[in-house]
Amino acid sequence: MAVERPKLALNPPTICVLYLFLFLAPIDARKPHHISFRSPDLYPEAAVWDPSAQHFIVGSLRSRSIHSVSDAGVVDTLISDPSLPPNSTILGLAVTVDGEASIFSRSAAFTSFPVDRDAPYSYCGINGIAYVSRGFLLVVQSNTGKMYKVDVDDGTAKTVLLNRDLPLADGIAVRGDGVILVVSMNMLWFVKSDDNWLEGVVFDGTPLDAERFATSVAVGGGDRAYVLYGYVMEGIKGTRPEGREWFEIEEVRSEKESKEEKVWVYVLLGFGLAYFLFWRFQMKQLVQKINKKQN
């Protein structure tokens, strides 16, 4: 008498293969997160992610206020101070948990590279700043494209040796895996280091929409990189007399990292399929042996 073959829908290898196809394959299909938010004449220059409240916080070029922006684009005013001078702007923002004082540095390293005074934005010097573990800061300089490592105790600074400059670097943020994100109006760079930031490698760069003028980068939920499109230059020059109502915060990915993720997905899918086929072969051999004994 022939032995009935096991039902594939109930066995662990089949479940494993289905899991790989249903849950790993969609990783590649997810679209970048896009947030459009409405706040007339806001022109935000800086954005940070508040992990406790799970929303972004933005300042304003033209209003004396700070606002939160949810994933759905809902804007709420957190602080508004009419007592400030009418021309006040809120550019830099930070979210801290301990309230410690800022560290300032006047290192000669910041003036050790020549600046082309005829180049656009040559007047912009030290700009983005981020705290990195182990007691130091990383800062970027817009008019030289350099990155510096600053000691939080004594303020001494050293140039981080990179494989390329970061022209017009503006905002900077640190991802959970240690990768540094640096944004300019037209590019988001991905930088990493294996020697505690004595040297670094710019391993990828994602082009941005220069017209929307990105000025800030933040690491949001899920360790995802977001850039703020605040149309700041439009706000500074006043080229839109009627003002602007809508602004954007967009997730930006590294193409190189996305390709690597795809490779791992395909490897896992291939492994699952190979395991399933091997199991099928083994089961077939087992059934044939049992049938021979029965006959």
Image: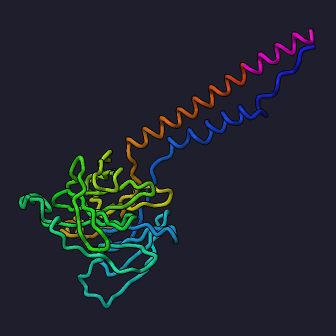
Closer to the camera in the image, 197 or 269: 197
- Residue occupying the point 26% across, 70% down: 242
Reply yes or no: does residue 286 show up in magenta. yes
Residue 12: percent from the left, percent from the top?
Answer: 74, 35
In percent of width and height, residue 41 lies at: 31, 72
222 relative position to 188: left or right: right
Residue 55 appears in view? yes
For the point 20% across and 56% down, the residue is: 145
Residue 53's spot in the image, x, y percent?
A: 52, 71
Q: Is residue 41 visible?
A: no
Task: Between residue 51 and residue 161, name the one nearer to us.
Answer: 161
Please give the range of residues in magenta. 282-295
Q: On the image, which quarter does residue 23 sit in?
A: top right
Q: Would you identify the image quadrant in which residue 132 lies?
A: bottom left
Q: Residue at x 43, y 78 (%)?
A: 77
Find out whether residue 117 is within the magenta segment: no
Q: Is residue 240 above or below residue 210?
A: below
Q: Residue at x 71, y 32 (%)?
A: 13
Question: x, y percentage for residue 14?
Answer: 71, 32
Q: What type of secondary structure mainly makes up the magenta span?
A: helix
